[in-house]
Image (tube, rainbow, N blue to C red):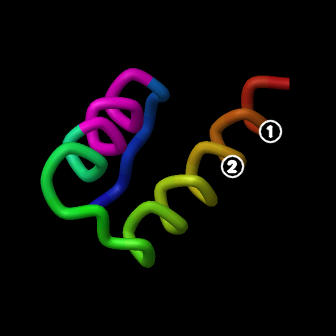
Amino acid sequence: MTINDMETLRAFVAYEKAHQQRVQILRRLDDRASELRSEDT
């Protein structure tokens, strides 16, 4: 799955933190957030 915007990414992070707390998933979401931020500049 590809996340193309910060709003969707934030929703995934919120869900993960509320339900599963899977560290690997949260790391990948953090990496994707960094990629999205660098694309915006």
Q: What residue is pinned by disc 1?
A: 38
In the picture, residue 1 is in which quadrant?
bottom left
Q: Which quarter of the image is occupied by the C terminus?
A: top right
**Helix, strand or loop status at disc 2:** helix
Q: Is residue 38 left or right of residue 29?
A: right
Q: Are marks 1 and 2 in contact (CB under 8 Å)?
A: yes
Q: Is residue 29 above or below residue 13?
A: below
* Alpha carbons under labels 1 and 2: distance apart: 5 Å
Question: Looking at the picture, which amino acid does disc 2 mark?
Answer: Glu
In the picture, residue 36 is in which quadrant?
top right
> How many numbered markers are drawn?
2
Give x and y (percent) for residue 30. Answer: 58, 53
**Helix, strand or loop status at disc 1:** helix
Q: Is residue 30 left or right of residue 12?
A: right
Q: Is residue 23 above or below residue 13?
A: below
Mark 1 nearby-residue class (10 Å; few <14, some 14–19, many ≥20): few
Boundaries of the magenta span: 7-14
Question: Looking at the picture, which amino acid does disc 1 mark?
Answer: Ser
Identify the residue at image location x=29%, y=36%: 14
**Disc sitting over residue 4 in the figure:** none
Give x and y (percent) for residue 26. Answer: 44, 61
Give x and y (percent) for residue 23. Answer: 42, 73
Mark 2 nearby-residue class (10 Å; few <14, some 14–19, many ≥20): few
Q: What residue is pinned by disc 2?
A: 35
Secondary structure mostly seen in magenta is helix
Q: Residue furthest right?
A: 41
6, 18: nearer the viewer: 18
Identify the residue at image location x=45%, y=29%: 5
Identify the residue at image location x=43%, y=38%: 4
